[in-house]
Each structure stands twice: as C-alpha cells, then as structure tokens.
Amino acid sequence: MDLGKNSLGESYCESNVKEPKLDNIRRCDEHNVIIEVGQTPNIHAFKVHSIILNSRSLYFKDKLRTITYNDNNVKIIKLANISTVVFEIIIKYIYGGTISLENINTSVVFELLIASSEFGLEELIKHIQLFLLENNASWLRLNFSRVCRTSLKDDNLKNLQQFCANIIAKHPSIIFDSDEFLTLTENILIFILKLDNLQMDEGKIWDYTINWGIAQTPSLPPNLDQWSDEHFLALKSSLQNCLPLIRYFQISGEDIFEKVRPYQKILDQTLWADIMLKFMAPNKTISSSNVLPPKASELRKNGEAYRIMGNYEESLIDLTKSLEIEANNANALSYRGATYFAMDRYKESLADLNKSLEIEPDNAFALKYRGAIYYSMDRYEESLADLNQSLIIKPNNASALRIRGETYRMMDRYEESLADLNQSLEIEPNNAITLKYLDSTYYWMDRYDESLASLTQSLKIEPNDATALRIRGETYLMMRMYEESLADLNQSLGIVPNDSRH
C-alpha cells in the first residue's frame, strides 16, 4: 500500500464523482452495496462493491455477512455517526490504497483516525498517528483532553496513548486539576495510576483517587462523619480496581494520618495493619501481597537524597532503577552522573551527563557537573565552556562559581579565579573547599598573607583537612615561619601518612 503519494486516488464509485480506475471494478450501475452516511436530512449515499469492501476491511466484511440483499440485490449499510467528508476520504482509500493528509484540516484528520480504527484499517491507523505526532503535535496538546479520552479507550491507538502517557507523567495536573477529572472513565484513571513515571506525590494521588471515587458514588453523604459502614463499602466498590494501584508505602506518615486514616475502612485489614507497621517499625517485614515498587520519580528523589548524604552505592541503586523505568529522564541521568563523579568514575559520569544534555541542553546541574569532570580530567577549556553556560542559566550557583574559579587558577587566570571564588563565598561564606581554593590562588600570586587567612578560616571549619594543612604548611614555609610550617605538615602527615607531596 502506498501511503506516501500526494494523491487521494479517486478510485471508488459514487454518483457524483469520477468513475473508478481499478481494472476489476465495473461501472457504477453494477454496484451491490449502498452505504448511507450521516443523519436525516443530510444522508449521503455511496454506491460501492462488496468485493472491494470484503478484501480491504474486516469491519465491512463482518457487517456484510449480517445483512441480506434487498429486492434490488443490494445491501444497505447505515453509518449515522460519521461525517460525509471523512467517509469520502475513507472510501477513496479503501478503493485506491493511497492518501494524502497534508492539505486536510487537523480536526478532520483526527476524525479520520477514529473512523480508520472503527473500520479496522491497520496501516492507515499507523500512518495517521505518525502523521499527527510528527506534524501536528501542537494541535494534539491543545486538544489534549479529547485526544486522551479517545486514544485511551482504543487499543489500536498505541502511539497516541504513549504521547498522552508522556505528557501526563511529566505534567499530571493537566488531568488531575482539569474540570473533567471527576468524569473520567475508570479505564483512563487506571491507565494513569499504572504509570511508573508519574511525577506526583503519592499522597496527592490518593486524594485525587478518593475524590474521583466519591464522584462515582452519588449516594454518599457530603459529611464524612455521617458515613455508615455501608457508605464505606460503596466507595470501596467504586474504587475496587484503583485501590490496588496506590503505592501506600510511598505515602508520608503525615499524609497517612491526615488523608488515608479517615478512609481506612475501604482498605483490607491486613494492608492497613502493614501501613501502620511500616511507620512504627520501618525495618519489619510486611505481609501484604502485591506491594507496588516506588515510582521512577520517588526512586529519583531517593537517589539524589542518598547522593547528597554521601551514600553513593545506595544512590546508584535507586537512580539506576529509576532509569530502568524512564530511560530518558534528564534529571535522573544528571543525578547518576553526579554520583559517578563523586565516586571518581569519570567515564560513566561523562556518559550519563552527555546523554542528559542531549535531552535537555540547558540543564544547569548537568553542565556544572560535566564542567567539574572536564576539570578533573585536565580538560580546562571544555570545563570552562560548560561552567560558563551553567552560570548563564543559574548565575548565583556557589558551587559552579567555585569550580570555575579553580579552573581559572589551573589556567593561570588568577584575577578571574579570585573574582569567582570571592563571589562564591558571598553566597556560601563558610565553605571550606572554596576557602581552600581561594588560598591556592593567593599562594600562586605570592599573596601569602591572604592565602594564610583563607586557609586558617578553612581549617576552623574542617580542622582535619590534610590538604589544607599541607598547603598552609607550604605557605608558612614561603613566609619563613618554619615552626608553624613543620607543625602543619606533621599534622597533615598524621592524617594522610603516605602523602608523597610532603
């Protein structure tokens, strides 16, 4: 089938269009099927041939089997819920096998997709979906509710379903906060709740699910204090297919108490007992079956928290699990890249950060860490390029300024180094690492008094920093303060005995 030609291929037979050009179709007066499209008084009759319909559409093949011929030896098919414009395109495609969508209004193309699915035209379904996604994504977003409702109830529209899933996962409020949320069909809500990469707090998901269930159960009193056991059972029945999709063990203790506890009667007793156990004794094994794993967003959040705490192995585990669910999440990639960097695994770090920046070129966090890796690899020009871009996006990021200041120092650009390091210290006045870098810059500028002041302040914050002690010892040496130099160098060696730089 040629779906790429710029011709509609006028190859069906209808009284007010050209005669068909297919060799195996005879003249219009030999038709044996009439398809009546539309509603009175605007019914349009298409005179067609069963041999073509049977060979090109399972829908019409099945339909024709159930219809008997009338006295004129013609079968009548009535299609009231499709427009004449759309059906005319469909029937031309069925006869000619070619279609051009470029000059058709997008809303008509979408109706054409729905009709193609109803008629079981698989190749046309795939073609129209790709056409819409590649050429009319903005229209799909503007008409998101309609697109979502249509695609999620039709398993033939897998590409559009994925389009909707991606948007809902990143921007859940587009559905949950819409005026139409409470009228969603159950299958759409279930589809959303099953998204492992849904970026919404689990406590909020519980709230929205409860509100949806209440809307589906009109017999419930408006005041929860007036509910009987029968009312809770009615809500449980409305939510029976949704409740198993809630990740209860990812809900905060506060939300469990304030949001879930009032509705505990709709939960199985064993589940509720395990929820209580989890918050009273987190290390105890729970007995509930079918406990859902954390969503990608929760794993990503946990992984970044572990990284900040210095628990790098745990960070890697959670971030890798998150990326197994959502492989192209730029933030998860940048967080894992930062974790690899902290573990001195530069090759893996660089791979993750490169991929993150391919997805989001203006990710300041990823740019900063890639700049730090380039610095650690002595690739100072590349480091500077990334850090400059990161600081354009977030000009007051103290750590980016600190790394750029140290990069400038390694490039012998001392004045620029001082400017960045001092600006970083204005934002984070007691950062020991920045103070140590500032000392190094002063040291190489032969400004030993200022170097000494920075190091002394740094060592007040981190008194057992062997590197700072070593550098201060060298500074004292340059200032001919030998006893102080010896004391610092000895203390440094006591912390790192095998440091060959002493």
Image (cartoon, rainbow, N blue to C red):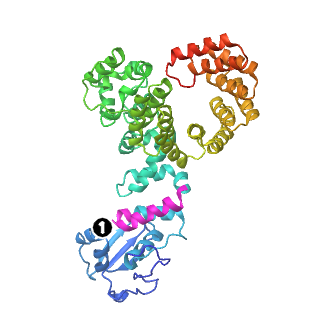
Q: Is the N terminus in the top left, top right, bottom left or bottom right quadrant?
A: bottom left
Task: Kindly indicate the quadrant of the structure image that contains residue 84.
Answer: bottom left
Q: Amino acid at mark 1?
A: Tyr
Tell me which secondary structure the magenta stretch mostly adopts: helix
Work out whether residue 41 can be spotted. no
Q: Is residue 86 left or right of residue 275?
A: right
Q: Is residue 116 left or right of residue 309?
A: left
Is residue 67 depicted above or below 483 in this figure? below
Q: What residue sits right under mark 1 in the picture? A: 59
Q: Is the C terminus in the top left, top right, bottom left or bottom right quadrant?
A: top right
Q: Is residue 193 left or right of residue 495?
A: left
Q: Foreground residue, 48 or 383?
A: 383
Tell whether position 234 is magenta: no
Residue ID at (56%, 55%): 138
Residue 216 drawn at (x, y percent): 38, 36
Q: Which residues are magenta?
A: 115-137
Residue 181 drawn at (x, y percent): 46, 40
Mark 1: few/some/many CA within 10 Å (<14, 14-19, 20+): some
Q: Foreground residue, 379 or 167?
A: 379
